[in-house]
Image: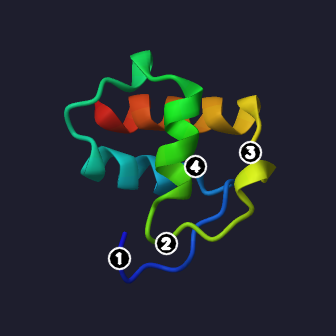
C-alpha cells in the first residue's frame, strides 16, 4: 500500500488488500482478532486511532480478506 492515501478503519477493502499482500500464506478464516488488529495498526499507510476498532470492523476486514483471497 505504499504511496496510497492514508487508511482508516472503515477502509476495509484497502486493508484487506494490504493484508493479502503482506500475509499471502495466512488463511483469514482462522485469524484471531487480536492478531488482525495488530497487523492493521502496523500497516505503513494506516492512520487512525488504534482503539477505534471494534469487533464489527475487524469482522468486516476479515470478510473482505476472505472474499478478496478467492
Q: Where is residue 7 in the image (x, y as percent from the top left)?
A: 58, 67
Q: Is mark 1 on a helix, strand or loop?
A: loop
Counting residues from the N terminus, which is met first, the one under dot 4 or under dot 3? 4
Q: Do the residues labelled 1 and 4 touch (CB within 8 Å)?
A: no
Crowdedness near tag 4: few (<14), some (14–19) or many (≥20) residues, C-alpha within 10 Å: many
Residue 43 lies, in percent from the top left, at 45, 61
Q: In this view, does 47 lie above or below 10?
A: below
- Near mark 3 (Cα within 10 A), the count class, few <14, some 14-19 or many ≥20, is some
Q: Which of marks 1 and 4 is in front?
A: 1
Going 53% across and 45% down the picture, which residue do you hit? Answer: 38
Q: Which residue lies furthest to the top in this view?
A: 30
Q: How many labels does the image show?
A: 4
Separation of disc 2 and disc 4 at Cα? 13 Å
Judge depth for marks 4 and 3 and give the one in front. 3
Q: Is mark 4 on a helix, strand or loop?
A: helix
In the image, 12 versus 27, the foreground residue is 27
Q: CA–CA distance between discs 4 and 3?
A: 11 Å
Q: Name the residue under label 1.
A: 2
- How far apart are the two marked residues, 1 and 4, measured between alpha carbons? 16 Å
Q: Name the residue under label 3.
A: 53
Q: Mark 2 points at which residue?
A: 45
Q: Residue 12 carries which label?
A: 4
Residue at point 44%, 70% (across, down): 44
Q: Do callouts 1 and 2 mark residues in contact (Cβ within 8 Å)?
A: yes
Amino acid at each position: 500500500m505504499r504511496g496510497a492515501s492514508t487508511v482508516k478503519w472503515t477502509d476495509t477493502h484497502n486493508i484487506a488488500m494490504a493484508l493479502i499482500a503482506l500475509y499471502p500464506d495466512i488463511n483469514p478464516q482462522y485469524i484471531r482478532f487480536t492478531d488482525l488488529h495488530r497487523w492493521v495498526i502496523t500497516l505503513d499507510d494506516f492512520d487512525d486511532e488504534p482503539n477505534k476498532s471494534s469487533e464489527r470492523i475487524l469482522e468486516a476486514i476479515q470478510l473482505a480478506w476472505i472474499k478478496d483471497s478467492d
